[in-house]
């Protein structure tokens, strides 16, 4: 461990709550939001000997960029459609062929594009996974014996990345094909029009080092909105319960994680560090009795 960099953090946090009582009706509403960003101002050479950057896996810490930025190949926005296009392009290896992802040739040993896609010269910083804008809110209301509450939270700006462990088909020559790829990948059995609109590259373990390299192709907007909890309850009138020697009786139904709006594959939990874990929705009905 070493003190590697000088980092400047800046942002703001806001929160507010309002409540009101109108005879038998009472309600409160609250919300919060925060915004944060950071920038690396200086790099200590440390054990690396480099004064302008430090690379660890697919992350880079470099001056004037966010700490631990994604460091990856830049996808051109195209999937190879013809062999002629493949032959006339810079590639990661000779196994790259029609149906594979096409990357941008950024640089080479001499500081100019060299016709080869390599992690040494063609990766660039592309933002980081730090949530830039987070928010949440609650609403509570009651009328006589009826009570209602709702809570939500989300992230308004965040870069997220689909790990190859979640999306790579035929993994280690025996894995199956993830459902998010079904009907959306390049295939020699598709028409030319279908392949032009294909969202994912061909299903191949041979080109895994090209198609599943750390690249901007697998990066997406990780913002989301989640309805975290919704509860509806009813408390029996005290005149009823006190006759039975009971202080309070409340019936309620509560649901957690009922709704999520995001760009993640259906069912994936955007709050988990390993995103392929599913969202678990729960519905609880209960009875509270106080003596």
Image (spheres, helix red, strand yellow):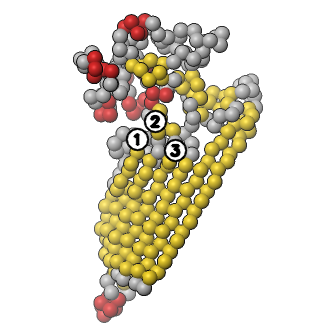
- Crowding at mark 3 (Cα within 10 Å: few <14, some 14-19, many 20+): some
Q: Earlier in the sequence, mark 3 or mark 1?
A: 3
Q: Does the rendering let one see residue 62? A: yes
Label annotation for residue 220: 2
Q: In the rendered view, tell whether residue 152 sits above or below residue 48.
A: below
Left or right of 12: which side holds 33?
Answer: left
Whether 17 is drawn above or below 244: the answer is above
Work out how far the residue at label 1 is from the one at label 2, CA to CA, in angstroms.
8 Å
Q: Position of residue 111 (x, y in %)?
A: 65, 13
Give the CA separation, mark 3 to mark 1.
Answer: 12 Å
Which residue is depicted at the point 53% across and 51% down? 134
Depth order, front residue of 224/45: 224
Q: Position of residue 270 (x, y in %)?
A: 44, 45
Across and down, in percent, residue 211 comes to 42, 21
Q: Is residue 137 above or below residue 244?
A: above
The residue drawn where x is 34% and y is 56% is 258
Q: Quadrant of the C terminus?
A: bottom left
In primary-sequence order, the first of circles 1 and 2 is 2
Q: Residues within 10 Å of mark 2 (few under 14, many from 20)?
A: some
Which residue corresponds to mark 3? 157
- Is 42 in front, or is 199? 199
Query: Along the polypeptide, which appears first: circle 2 or circle 3?
Result: 3
Question: Image quadrant of residue 278?
Answer: top left
Q: Which mark is residue 263?
A: 1
**Residue 38 vs residue 194, the one in the foreground:** 194
Q: Secondary structure at mark 1?
A: loop
Could you say where residue 154 lies in the image, as x and y percent from the top left?
47, 52
């Amino acid at each position: 461990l070493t003190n590697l960099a000088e980092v400047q953090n800046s942002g703001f946090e806001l929160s507010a709550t309002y409540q009101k009582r109108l005879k038998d009706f009472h309600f409160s509403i609250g919300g919060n939001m925060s915004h944060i960003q950071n920038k690396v101002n200086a790099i200590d050479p440390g054990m690396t000997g480099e004064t302008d950057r430090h690379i660890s896996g697919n992350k880079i810490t470099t001056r004037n960029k966010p700490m631990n930025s994604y460091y990856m190949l830049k996808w051109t926005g195209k999937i190879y459609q013809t062999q002629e296009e493949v032959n006339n392009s810079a590639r990661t290896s000779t196994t790259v062929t029609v149906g594979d992802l096409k990357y941008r040739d950024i640089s080479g040993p001499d500081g100019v594009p060299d016709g080869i896609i390599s992690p040494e010269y063609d990766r660039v910083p592309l933002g980081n996974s730090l949530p830039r804008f987070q928010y949440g809110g609650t609403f509570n209301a009651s009328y006589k014996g009826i009570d209602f509450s709702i809570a939500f939270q989300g992230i308004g700006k965040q870069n997220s990345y689909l790990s190859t462990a979640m999306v790579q088909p035929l993994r280690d020559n025996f894995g199956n094909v993830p459902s998010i790829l079904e009907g959306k990948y390049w295939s020699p059995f598709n028409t030319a029009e279908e392949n032009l609109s294909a969202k994912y590259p061909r299903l191949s373990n041979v080109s895994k080092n090209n198609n599943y390299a750390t690249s901007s192709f697998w990066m997406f907007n990780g913002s989301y909105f989640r309805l975290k909890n919704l509860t509806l309850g009813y408390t029996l009138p005290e005149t009823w319960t006190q006759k039975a020697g009971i202080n309070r009786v409340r019936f309620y139904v509560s649901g957690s994680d009922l709704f999520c709006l995001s760009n993640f594959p259906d069912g994936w939990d955007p709050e988990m560090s390993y995103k392929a874990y599913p969202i678990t929705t729960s519905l609880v009905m209960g009875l509270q009795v106080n003596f």
